[in-house]
Image (spheres, helix red, strand yellow):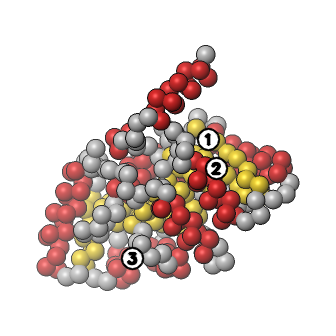
Amino acid sequence: MFLVLAEVASRIAARFPRHQIVWKPDLLLPIEDPKASVGSLLFIRSITYPSGSLYSFSVKDKDIEEARKDLEYAIAPLRSENILVNSTIIEENNFLHGAKLVIQTLLGSAFRPNCIFLNVGSKKEKDEIIKKLVDYAGNNELGTLLLRQHPRIAFGLQKDINLWLRDKSPNWHLAVLVSLQIQLNWGGKINLVTVANSKNDEARLYEFLNNISQQSRLPSLTEFNVLTGKFTDVLKEAPRADINIFGLGETIDLNNLRNITELAMSSCLFVKDSGNESALV
């Protein structure tokens, strides 16, 4: 009976376009090696819990059944948190091609992911794959979450969040929505942070942060911080936080993202809108 009801509901849902008011974090998570520990699972839980979902996959050309068991074992902690989790193994010898196949297939699903979640490691050998995957995901209306986990500090006490916003940038809706999800699960405080070129810009930028806070209904304890100077110089002046969240530009320099993480002395999440999110509804 439940299967029949679910099928009918999915058919009805497929007739209607997605609306911004029903946005929730539905992540697509590529896992290159299911046997390796997925160190970002706890953070993924902070984004998706309680109503989000996760679709994870790996690409293998041999030992498929073993890889399937390894993937199930890797994501089992999230499933135990009652988060909706799906997983699959793609039989393919090229990881990027396999990932594209997954995205293409999910485009036709009534309940498809809306963001791709990728980890930026210390080694540069995977950088080109990450950049191509981000571009492909964006072309298929997926938002992007790039996590650079600090190798020593990780996520600290899992409390406070620095959300960096740039004046006149259209790329801030997904960052706000994800910040609210993390704050909900961490129970900490959101600091809105922006950078002014000169003292003359400070008053205008405080008003900018206040408008964003009111329009997106951020918690009342949210604090505003306008730092004056060059971006890389003022990173160390920002409030101490357990995660720093930045917008991601059109051109991605992963080495620069690694440097920002070291300067910020915390794990950093770099976010790019798909164009289908709105923090104002």
Picture residue at 34% right of the left edge, 75% below the top: 237
Answer few, some or many: residues within 10 Å of disc 1's Cα (few below 14, many 20 plus, some between 14 and 19): some
2 or 3: mark nearer the eye: 2
- CA gap, disc 2 and disc 1: 8 Å
Secondary structure of the residue carrying tag 3 is helix
Identity, as a three-letter code, of the amino acid under mark 1? Val
Return the residue nearer the eye: 164 or 188: 164
Note whether residue 41 is visible: no
First-in-chain label (1 vs 3): 1
Identity, as a three-letter code, of the amino acid under mark 3? Lys
Secondary structure of the residue carrying tag 2 is strand
First-in-chain label (2 vs 1): 2
Quadrant for the C terminus, please. Answer: top left
Answer few, some or many: residues within 10 Å of disc 2's Cα (few below 14, many 20 plus, some between 14 and 19): many
Left or right of 122? Residue 270 is left
Note whether residue 5 is visible: yes
Return the residue nearer the eye: 114 or 70: 114
Quadrant for the N terminus, please. Answer: top right
- Do residues under tags 2 and 1 come within 8 Å of each other at their CB atoms? yes
Q: How many marks?
A: 3
Left or right of 48? Residue 166 is left
Secondary structure of the residue carrying tag 1 is strand
Residue 95 location (% of width, % of height): 70, 64
1 or 3: mark nearer the eye: 1
Residue 278 location (% of width, % of height): 32, 50
- Using the image, determine if residue 11 lies above or below residue 154: above
- Using the image, determine if residue 133 lies above or below residue 16: below
User: Label 2, on which residue?
Assistant: 56
User: Label 1, on which residue?
Assistant: 85
- Disc assigned to residue 236: 3
